[in-house]
Structures are given as structure tokens and as C-alpha cells.
Image (cartoon, rainbow, N blue to C red):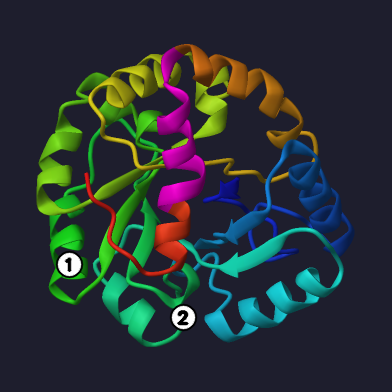
Amino acid sequence: MIDFHSHILPGIDDGARNLEQSIQIINEAKEAGFTKIISTSHYMENYYECNEKNRKILLEQVQKSISGIELYLGNEIYITNDIVNLLKDGKASTINNTRYVLFEFPLIQTKPMNDKEVIYRLIENGYIPIIAHPERYPFVQEDPDYLFELADMGALFQANYGSIIDMYGIKARKTLKKILKEDLISFFGSDVHRINQVYTKMPKIMKKLKKILPDEQIIEFTEINPQKVLNNEDIIK
């Protein structure tokens, strides 16, 4: 499996604090059956601003310290009107230097005013937007059909594994089930930040997923589509 969303690089966001923790988290991933992890450290203007060059150095250091898992560079970018400039200036990163950009909305009650503007700017500049964990946003929980508006613009969506076991509350789980039924999800990610958070719970998570999704769709979300992104290939919905 390929983990599409993780915070494994040490000391640059609210994820792993040091190299030792990074290694422990990655070893948990290996034991859970993952063979590749996309590192999507937060990029938030004026808060988490480790640039692409320095994140590459950290990724190489972590990669040399582990075995059995391949690591790839990305970001989880906090929504901003300046997102295209951040990417072009080498501050924030696409996933594995492809067209695909993972970004997040604020976890608040009202949807951001610039949601569609940011998606439009990304697509206009040749990028493919992927919105992280839509099931967690209160405004999506209140109106899941809102995601169809963004999907019609060309946005894709990545769900968190933990949502299926109430890691983010009952509303997140119910919303995830609804948007899975509507075929709005293309990827799953752990969104792992620390030891013993998600990877050690994967047997329980996969058991739950297999009750609501056919095996071929689970493979699509956890292996096929993530690999297409790494290869810069198109995702057909």
C-alpha cells in the first residue's frame, strides 16, 4: 500500500519531533503493510515554512535511516490565494514533483471564501488540486453535496483512514461513508503525526473498510491511484 498523507519528517511541523520518532513511525507503517509513504508536511504561511530544498534534505536523511519503505516528497498546504506562487518559488511542493497538489481547508464551521478561487488558480496553472480529509470539515459534514461543486471544477479528494474508526468523531465517520457512497474519494492517507496513532490500528481500519467497500475499490484508493499520482498520470473519476 501507499500512504498518501503523512507527517513523518522530523521537527518541521506538528508531526514527528525528531529522527528517532520518524523511524519509529515508519517502522509501524512497514509492519502495517505499507511500502511507500508520501511525506506531506504542513506548509502554512508565517507558521510552517520549511522550504522544498530543506525538506528534500530531511527526506534523504530519513530515507537513509530506514529500509523497506520508499519515501516521496510532498506538502499539505494550508489554503491561500498565494498557493501557485508558493509552488513556483520552491517554497511549497507538489507531490513527487508532479502536477498534483495536496491542500487543506481550515477546520471551522464555514467554508473558506476563496475555496473555488484557489482551485481555479491551480487548474489554470496546470496543477491538479487534491483536498485533504474533506470528511473532517464541519461545513462538509453539514453539506456533503458541496463537494460535488469542487469535483465538477476538477478537484480530487483524499480521506483519512482514521475517520472510519471515529478518530475524528462520529460526524466524520458518517460523512466519509456518505461521500464514499457518492464515489467522491480517490485516495486514503494516514495523516499520521505520531507513534501509535494510525498504523498500529490498520487491521481494525481495514476490517471496517472491507465492510463498506469492495476489495477492488480499496486497492484503487490505496495502491493504484496513489501510484498514478507518483507517476504523474491522470486519475479518471
- Relative to 34, residue 184 above or below: above
Mark yes or no: residue 11 visible.
yes
Query: Disc 1 marks which residue?
Result: 123
Mark yes or no: residue 77 visible.
no
- Name the residue type under label 2: Lys
- Relative to 5, residue 82 above or below: below
In this picture, residue 27 sits left or right of residue 179: right
Residue 72 within the magenta-colored segment of the rendering: no
Total labels: the figure holds: 2
- Name the residue type under label 1: Ile
Structural crowding at the residue carrying mark 2, measured as other residues with C-alpha within 10 Å and reported as few (<14), some (14–19) or many (≥20): some
Q: Where is residue 82 in the image (x, y as percent from the top left)?
A: 28, 73
Q: Quadrant of residue 90?
A: bottom left
Q: Which of the labelled discs sits on residue 91, or is there none?
A: 2
- Relative to 229, residue 207 above or below: above
In this picture, residue 3 sits left or right of residue 96: right
In depth, the one of 37 and 68 nearer the eye is 68
Residue drawn at x 38%, y 14% is 174
Q: Which of the labelled discs sits on residue 199, or is there none?
A: none
| Residue numbers of the magenta segment | 212-225
Which part of the image, by quadrant, shows the C terminus?
A: top left
Q: Position of residue 152 (x, y in %)?
A: 10, 45
In depth, the one of 127 and 219 nearer the eye is 219
In depth, the one of 233 and 182 nearer the eye is 233
